[in-house]
Image (cartoon, rainbow, N blue to C red):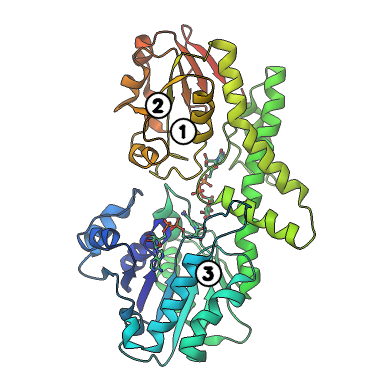
Amino acid sequence: MQVSVVGSGYVGTTIAACLADLGHDVVAVDIDQAVVDAINAGDSPIHEPGLDERIAEHAGGRLRATTDYGVLPDTDLTFLAIQTPSNADGSIDTSALEAASEMTGEALAGRPEDGGSQVVDEHVVVVKSTVLPDVVDARLAPRIKAHAGDRVSVAANPEFQREGSAVADFLAPDKLVFGTAPGDERALDALHECYAPLLEARAADGHDVPIVETDVPTAMMVKYANNAFLAAKVSLINDLGNVCKTYGIDTYEVADAIGLDDRIGAKFLRSGLGWGGSCFPKDVAAIVHAAREHGYEPRMLQAAIDVNDHQPERMLELLEKHVDVDGARVAVLGLAFKPGTDDVRNSRAIPVIDGLQERGADVVAYDPVATENMREHFPDLEYADSAASALHGADAALVTTDWDEFQALDDEFDAMHSKVIVDGRRVIEPQDDLTYDGLTW
Ligand SMILES: NC(=O)C1=CN([C@@H]2O[C@H](COP(=O)(O)OP(=O)(O)OC[C@H]3O[C@@H](n4cnc5c(N)ncnc54)[C@H](O)[C@@H]3O)[C@@H](O)[C@H]2O)C=CC1
Ligand SMILES: O=C(O)[C@H]1O[C@H](OP(=O)(O)OP(=O)(O)OC[C@H]2O[C@@H](n3ccc(=O)[nH]c3=O)[C@H](O)[C@@H]2O)[C@H](O)[C@@H](O)[C@@H]1O
């Protein structure tokens, strides 16, 4: 199948490389020339395990990149994987996605001045971006169809991959959700054809992937409900964890026990500093905002946000029990919002660093891959090139991301001025000569 993917960020690059791996001919379209150049040179524009190899293997073959929307009519199906960031009030900013929809419609209509060289007979545009249930039909499809007409179907296929394991998640999904307009067989057939090689590969490994066929608004609501449920699950274990801590009980022991109950499940029970990233905070805020616009107050979801917002403050309060933060040199270990990624969007390290600076600390930060991205937030912060050098001479260290390499830290603590560790991710093994405090244990 000929597939185009518009938007080559975390999602777009992953699905473009994976679809090429599955045998499709894929063209990635992005307005960022640097991103396009990287892919064509066989390099990944983002840090994601398994992506480098796939891009290196397929670039120049089944995978190419361009800034030219004129390639769209030569493909059968176009995914839109454009960012949908939060506005200050929690609603989502769909302007970039709307612009991309407009450009997609123009290209499919074959207007030469918009990069189109031919009028397509039939085409399917699939929205991968996460948008509220009414956005595809109200704001995206009209922009595409105004130019390209009803020869083009517009469908939704929300994505459930996680950063840090995006390739593995995309290739082994728990489910696929196909949202199409009622009776739109063209869209449904195209989605089935696109995913057929993935389903065959999973079947060969003995796994059936359930496919949920539904309408477009329900497909997007599934995406929001999925993320809201997981974020709330983490907030609930953090809330319970804060209670456990007041009794001196280890929340991880409790979580292991409750996770044995099938109705609860063992995943997403790691308590600590809370959830960050480009999606949980954005998506929970968006659904809360939308609910209020419709006159409903979503109390559980707001509570999930409140608990999450408070965990960094709890970390700083714990630190204050052990050191006088004003003037202290504090090492922050971990800047990415989770391990395995260089993404710092809404990283919990950001409010922690803000809080340290407000309290007059001298902060030194380290992350194995996310330092450059964090420089955009904190250009004047001191960045160390290893955990060992961050710890050297520090009065305390805060663990903010659960990178594996922090587990191996041992003698490095000896170079600290005072060996105080506040662990927000349960990474460090407590030792007799360390003053060790966990956030919820
Ligand atoms: N990051 C993730 O792991 C996941 C993200 N999502 C959703 O997927 C969507 C995309 O997210 P990310 O990949 O993280 O965003 P991103 O910000 O990493 O990538 C967006 C890309 O679109 C490009 N772009 C912007 N306007 C364009 C235009 N008019 N034409 C062509 N390219 C354009 C940008 O240059 C950028 O490379 C969002 O709605 C997000 O909520 C869903 C599941 C997972
Ligand atoms: O819509 C999205 O973008 C994606 O959002 C999340 O994926 P992601 O944000 O990449 O990473 P997660 O592994 O879900 O972690 C999110 C945050 O929760 C935190 N977390 C996660 C699990 C846990 O037990 N405890 C915990 O604090 C992580 O540290 C991280 O800050 C969802 O897990 C994906 O299914 C979804 O596709």
Q: Residue at x 57, y 22 (%)?
A: 316
The span from disc 2 to disc 1 (Cα, nearest Å) is: 9 Å
Tell me if mark 1 has few (under 14), some (14-19) or many (20+) residues whose alpha carbon lies within 10 angstroms of its own: many
In the picture of the structure, the residue carrying the numbered disc 3 is 157
Q: Is residue 197 above or below residue 223?
A: below
- Name the residue carrying label 1: 401
Mark seen at residue 406: 2
The residue at the point 36 percent across, 74 percent down is: 4
Badge 1 amino acid: Thr
The image quadrant where one finds ligand 1 is bottom left
The image quarter in which residue 38 lies: bottom left
- The answer to whether residue 113 is visible is yes
Query: Disc 1 to disc 3, how far (Cα)?
Result: 30 Å
Sequence-wise first label, 2 or 3? 3
Q: Tag 1's secondary structure?
A: loop
Using the rendered view, name the quadrant where residue 135 is placed. bottom right
Tell me if the residue at label 1 has its CB under 8 Å from ligand 2. yes
Give how far across and how far down residue 177 sits, in percent: 56, 68
Q: Above or below — where is 221 with respect to 417? A: below
The residue carrying pointer 2 sits among few (fewer than 14), some (14 to 19) or many (20 or more) residues within 10 Å by Cα, namely some
Say which quadrant the C terminus sits in: top right
* Residue 341 drawn at (x, y percent): 40, 44
Q: Are marks 1 and 3 in contact (CB under 8 Å)?
A: no
Q: Quadrant of residue 53?
A: bottom left
**Residue beneath the point at 69% across and 33% down:** 239
Dots 2 and 1: beta carbons under 8 Å?
Answer: yes
Question: How dense is the environment of label 3, judged by Cα within 10 Å: few (below 14), some, or many (20 and up)?
Answer: many
- Left/right placement of residue 93 relative to residue 338 reads right
Residue 314 screen position, x and y as percent: 62, 25
Asked if residue 195 shows in the view, the reply is no
Q: Does ligand 1 reach within 8 Å of label 3's beta carbon?
A: no
